[in-house]
Image: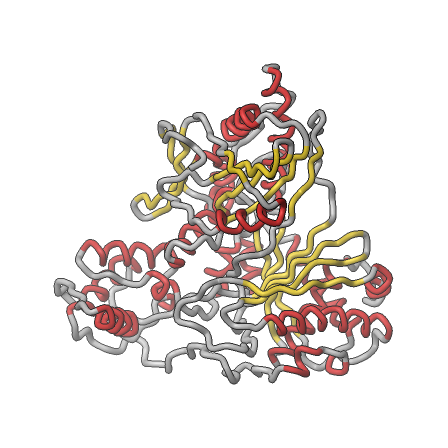
């Protein structure tokens, strides 16, 4: 544990939209470490661990969110802020050098966080030698994002020498706290200030279909969430040439990468209408930049590749859709999902099943420590919540990084094929920008049969249930009677049939949690992951009873009036 003692609880406020999503994903994930943010910093030179521990204590005191926990409070999720207190920095001896430190970091990263108990920050100092250390910071994503990790490391290095010498530190008082941002965003939504943006996303994402990539392996009932990765490297002249391809200009390297990634996904899947998630910083005001917190937002960019356009034509479309999305990036992803009403499947992320993360290469801006050399340590991906992710870094016009695929579904050679396909598409389009997309080289499409929107060999996609009449079906079992009563109460509808679909009746994720909680109080354990996907009362009860029978016990529920 990072905090040696649980501090007094100061106050409680509603969680942000992003925190609510993280809480829901954790409940459905069953205690994995899937949403742990990680950073490591190598410090070579004379180091005082006690001074570094005091600096860490000071950083946590500055940022309320680092001493917060998330709890279910009635019908909502609350962020509970604790008082500042001592923060421990355990020192662990690591024989074997940097490779052993990276391996230990991976092992420590697999320990899950308890969102309700906390703390949600764990730091460890790995000692390789007397004057050689690796600082490992593990933070739950609900209180941190990629930019926040940079804030954490910058402040920690800036505070080290003042804490070493017992003098005042140079950091200015923070103008805001993360909870202030969460309250402001809720007020924006409640006031209707974001309605135009919400309407845009609802229209843009209407009728979107799930991306179905032809997997190498059957989709397992229980996923390990590990990853297979392959490197990507595209030279600056290739990207620079492509930026000049789109009519009207205004194309960035990240837009070029998105267009190429969409081509690979389309050729691989056989789908011409797909969505790629783009992470954005989510800090619209300058006062938010020095804060730690979960600000990052995901923009689901819908790309239309029908008609076999040229790469230049596709790039113009991608540019326009990115510009539209960036100007409407205040809407939390959670509300986009609610407005778009996409198909939902248990255990799968709605709207975007793949992510493209393009970051600019900028220095971390670490403070200098006398006699100590500071160097970031790269930690390889160990977990994977998406089917496919491209993590790229923009250095001028050059693009480097890696492609990661879910090891539950894909072999390592497929990751290599996807990475090679991304590079091949970019090089070929740069040489002949008028070439139709279907004629661009794409090794993963050539080597793997496309799903074409249907189940591919080796896959085990759960198909949507056959359509049933709305309002149809009387409850027959005690469990069905109980859920009919709960749906009426929580969804505030007068008529509910056992074949009615939850989200079609106005359900959302938090209402699903309320039903799970209320059912549990009456003796019926419902699977939250199933409740977060599309479902009817009959489907949920049938699944629950089958799971209970397999586990060797029978579910019970008191009959409720229909």
Q: Quarter of the image containing the C terminus?
A: bottom left
Asked whether 463 or 118 is in front, the reply is 118
Please state if 276 lies on the left or on the right of 323 as rendered.
Answer: left
Q: Is residue 204 visible?
A: no
Please state if 521 lies on the left or on the right of 35 as rendered.
Answer: left
Please state if 16 lies on the left or on the right of 323 as rendered.
Answer: left
Q: Quarter of the image containing the N terminus?
A: top left
| Residue drawn at 40 percent across, 30 percent down | 4
492 w.r.t. 20: above or below: below
| Residue drawn at 67 percent across, 79 percent down | 306
Residue 53: image x %, image y %? 53, 28
Residue 194: image x %, image y %? 54, 50
Q: Residue furthest front?
A: 95
Q: Is residue 530 visible?
A: yes
| Residue drawn at 54 percent across, 47 percent down | 105
Residue 96: image x %, image y %? 59, 46
Asked whether 438 or 84 is in front, the reply is 84
């Amino acid at each position: 544990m990072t905090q040696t003692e649980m501090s007094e609880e100061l106050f409680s406020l509603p969680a942000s939209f992003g925190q609510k999503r993280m809480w829901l994903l954790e409940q459905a994930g069953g205690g994995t470490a899937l949403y742990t943010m990680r950073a490591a910093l190598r410090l070579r030179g004379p180091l005082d661990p006690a001074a570094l521990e005091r600096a860490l204590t000071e950083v946590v005191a500055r940022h309320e969110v680092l001493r917060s926990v998330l709890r279910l409070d009635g019908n909502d999720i609350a962020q509970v802020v604790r008082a500042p207190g001592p923060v421990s920095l355990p020192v662990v001896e690591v024989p074997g050098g940097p490779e052993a430190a990276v391996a230990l970091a991976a092992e420590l990263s697999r320990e899950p966080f308890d969102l309700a108990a906390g703390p949600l920050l764990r730091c460890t100092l790995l000692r390789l030698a007397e004057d050689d250390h690796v600082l490992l910071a593990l933070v739950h994503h609900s209180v941190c994002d990629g930019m926040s990790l940079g804030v954490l490391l910058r402040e920690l290095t800036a505070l080290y020498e003042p804490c070493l010498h017992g003098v005042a530190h140079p950091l200015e008082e923070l103008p805001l706290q993360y909870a202030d941002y969460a309250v402001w965003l809720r007020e924006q939504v409640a006031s209707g200030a974001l309605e135009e943006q919400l309407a845009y996303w609802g229209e843009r994402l209407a009728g979107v279909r799930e991306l179905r990539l032809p997997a190498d392996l059957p989709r397992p009932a229980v996923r390990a969430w590990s990853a297979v990765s392959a490197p990507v490297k595209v030279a600056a002249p290739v990207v620079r040439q492509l930026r000049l391809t789109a009519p009207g200009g205004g194309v960035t390297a990240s837009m070029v990468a998105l267009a190429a990634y969409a081509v690979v996904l389309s050729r691989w899947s056989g789908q011409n209408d797909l969505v790629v998630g783009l992470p954005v910083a989510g800090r619209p005001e300058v006062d938010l930049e020095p804060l730690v917190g979960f600000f990052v937002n995901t923009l689901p960019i819908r790309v239309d590749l029908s008609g076999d356009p040229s790469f230049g034509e596709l790039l113009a479309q991608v540019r326009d859709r990115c510009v539209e999305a960036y100007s409407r990036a205040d809407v939390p992803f959670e509300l986009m999902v609610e407005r778009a009403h996409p198909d939902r499947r248990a255990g799968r992320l709605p709207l975007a099943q793949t992510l493209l993360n393009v970051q600019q290469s900028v220095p971390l801006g670490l403070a200098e420590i006398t006699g100590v050399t500071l160097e970031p340590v790269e930690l390889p991906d160990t977990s994977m919540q998406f089917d496919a992710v491209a993590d790229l870094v923009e250095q001028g016009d050059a693009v480097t990084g890696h492609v990661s695929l879910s090891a539950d579904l894909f072999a390592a050679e497929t990751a290599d094929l996807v990475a090679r396909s991304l590079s091949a598409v970019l090089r070929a389009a740069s040489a002949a920008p008028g070439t139709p997309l279907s004629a661009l080289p794409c090794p993963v499409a050539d080597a793997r049969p496309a799903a074409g929107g249907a189940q591919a060999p080796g896959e085990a996609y759960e198909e949507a249930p056959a359509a049933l009449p709305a309002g149809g079906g009387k409850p027959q079992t005690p469990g069905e009677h109980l859920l009919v009563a709960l749906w009426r109460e929580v969804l505030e509808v007068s008529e509910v049939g056992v074949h009615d679909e939850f989200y079609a009746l106005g359900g959302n994720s938090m209402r699903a949690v309320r039903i799970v909680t209320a059912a549990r109080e009456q003796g019926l354990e419902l699977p939250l992951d199933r409740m977060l996907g599309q479902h009817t009362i009959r489907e949920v009860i049938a699944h629950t009873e089958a799971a209970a029978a397999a586990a060797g016990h029978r579910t019970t529920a008191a009959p409720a009036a229909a």
